[in-house]
Amino acid sequence: MTDAGVKRTVWPEQIGAAGAVRILVVDDQETFREAMEILVAATPGFTLAGEAPSGEDAIAAVDELAPHLVLMDVRMAGMGGLEAARTLAELHPEVVVILTSVYGPEELPQDMVDGCRAAAFARKQTLRPRLLLDLWEKHRRR
C-alpha cells in the first residue's frame, strides 16, 4: 500500500467523537468515495476513518485505521471486494464489512456472495443515513 492509496479523513466536527462508529470506504471510483464522505458526515454517530481505492489497500487500511465498519465495492481492479471481505473476516472478525454494488446480489455469482463472509450487501443507489444506521444496528459486533 502506498500513502497515496489510502486517504485518512477527520472532519473538524468529529474531532473528539470517541464513541463514533469509524467507517472505511473502499471503492475504485473516486466520485463514489466522495459521495460516501458526504453520507457518513450526514449520519449521526458516524465518522469517516478513511478511504481506499482497492481491496489490497483496504486490508492495509484496516490495520492502520481500525475502522468498525467497511463499506466495500464488490468489483474493483486487483483484489475485488468479495476476496477482500473474506480476508478481512479472517484477519479482523470484529470489523463489519458491508459490500456495495450498483447491481443486486441476485445479479452476482451466488457462490461468490455466499462465501465472502460479509455481514450484508447494499445497493449503492439505496445508501442513505437511515440505511447505514440500520445496517450497523443489525450487524455490529457487540
Image: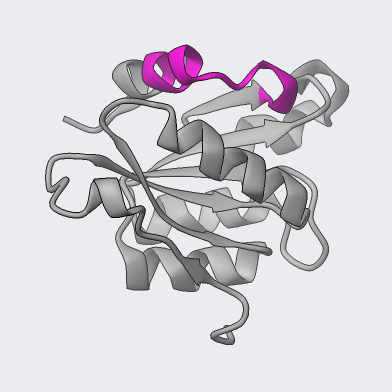
Color scheme of the displayed model: one colour
- Pick the residue in front: 23 or 83: 23
Q: Residue at (43%, 28%) from the top-left corner?
A: 42
* x then y, percent, for residue 27: 69, 52
Q: Nearer the viewer, residue 115 or 129?
A: 129
Answer whether residue 20 is visible to the viewer in this image: yes
Residue appearing at x 29%, y 29% in the figure:
140
102 part of magenta stretch: no
Which residue occupies the extreme bottom position in the image?
2
Relative side of 126 to 87, left or right: right
Q: Is residue 130 magenta?
A: yes
Identify which residue is drawn at 59% across, 87% down.
2
Compared with 53, 81 (above or below) is above
In the rendered image, residue 90, in percent from the top left (x then y), is placed at: 41, 56
Q: Position of residue 29 (x, y in %)?
A: 78, 53
Quadrant of the image occupied by residue 58: bottom right
- Quadrant showing the N terminus: bottom right
To which quarter of the image does residue 41 belong?
A: top left
